[in-house]
Amino acid sequence: MFNVDERIASCLPYLRVFYEVASCRSFTRAAERLHISQPAVTRQIKRLEAILGVSLFDRGSSPVQLTPAGRSLLGFVERSLSLLEEAHHLLESYREPTLKVGATRGYSKTTMPRILAGFQEENPKVRIVLSVDSSQGLERGVLEGVIDLAFLANPDHRRPLLFLPFREEELVCIASPSFVADLGERVSLADVVDYPFIVREKGSGTHKMVMEAFEAMGRKPKVLVEASSPEFIKEWVKAGKGLSIVTASSVEEEREEGKLRVLPIVEGLHLDVYVALLRGRRDEPLISAFLRYLGVR
């Protein structure tokens, strides 16, 4: 335990106000966010500057600009708020065992029911909340703390998240049994590029992988429809509207029932699926237990 300097302790009530003004670059907008008057914001900033003995804002500019001292303080305040957010999540996991998981639409139907049911069977007191979105939407949810962790295909590794490898998902070409009789049991991208395609929406891992694969061969598929619903895509393919490239696990039932032709792709396309979470949350008890259940390291 360490002793907090009295001057530092007296700053704490004003740091939230400082953060809002620094974020908005405006005393007026900060006051609106904090639901207090602008004069109250000005008084608190002046009080903080008096305590610290430095000027934090250049009030002569529009929008308001941080001084060098203000920029330095903002960095410390942002890190402190991030630590407080992590502490909040950790304490919440002790108080109320709720696991907030995110998955794409396809994964939420084919894979998540088995995973979540198995985990809850071993941990019956845990309440699970499943959010369904595109890969990009799920990344935002994890970054904003709305989701504890998410299953993402081919994520953007530039994001400040921890990505733990989970599994590979094979991509296959699907067609109506009556649509293209001359397609073999296996197809290359060159074999199918000139057919109409029904593809996943922008922002999904599958869309990104498929479009990049065609671009690598210098071609663009003839996109008939973009859709966020895997069920819509399968129904349109069944109706003979065109082809699609999807994960093999998402069409196992249709393949077994003979409702779709499922054709392996010569190029061996696959999605790398990761579990994504904030770096500081890996050792939280509930998240750690879920990762152990998944066998993720």
Image (cartoon, grey):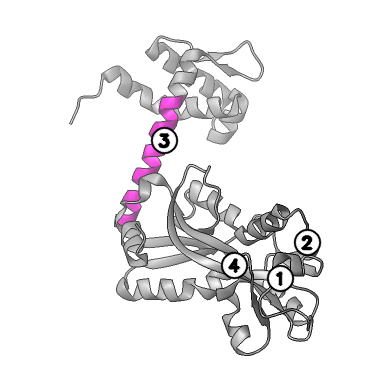
Check disc 2 and give the amino acid type. Answer: Pro
Q: Residue at x 42, y 67 (%)?
A: 128
| C-alpha gap between disc 4 and disc 1 | 16 Å
Check disc 4 and give the amino acid type. Answer: Arg
| C-alpha gap between disc 1 and disc 3 | 45 Å
| C-alpha gap between disc 2 and disc 4 | 23 Å
Residue placed under numbered mark 4 in the picture: 105
Q: Quadrant of the C terminus?
A: bottom left
Residue placed under numbered mark 1 in the picture: 244
Callout 3 crowding tier (Cα within 10 Å): few <14, some 14–19, many ≥20: some
In the image, the segment drawn in magenta is 75-94
Q: Residue 241 appears at what percent x and percent y?
A: 81, 76
Disc 1 or disc 3, which is closer to the eye? 1
Can see residue 184? yes
* Element type where label 2 sits in the image: loop
Residue placed under numbered mark 3 in the picture: 81
Examine the rendered structure and indicate whether residue 107 appears above or below residue 39.
below
Q: Residue 147 appears at what percent x and percent y?
A: 48, 55
* Element type where label 1 sits in the image: strand
Cβ atoms under marks 1 and 2 closer than 8 Å: no
Work out whether residue 183 or residue 142 is closer to the camera in this orientation and state it: 183
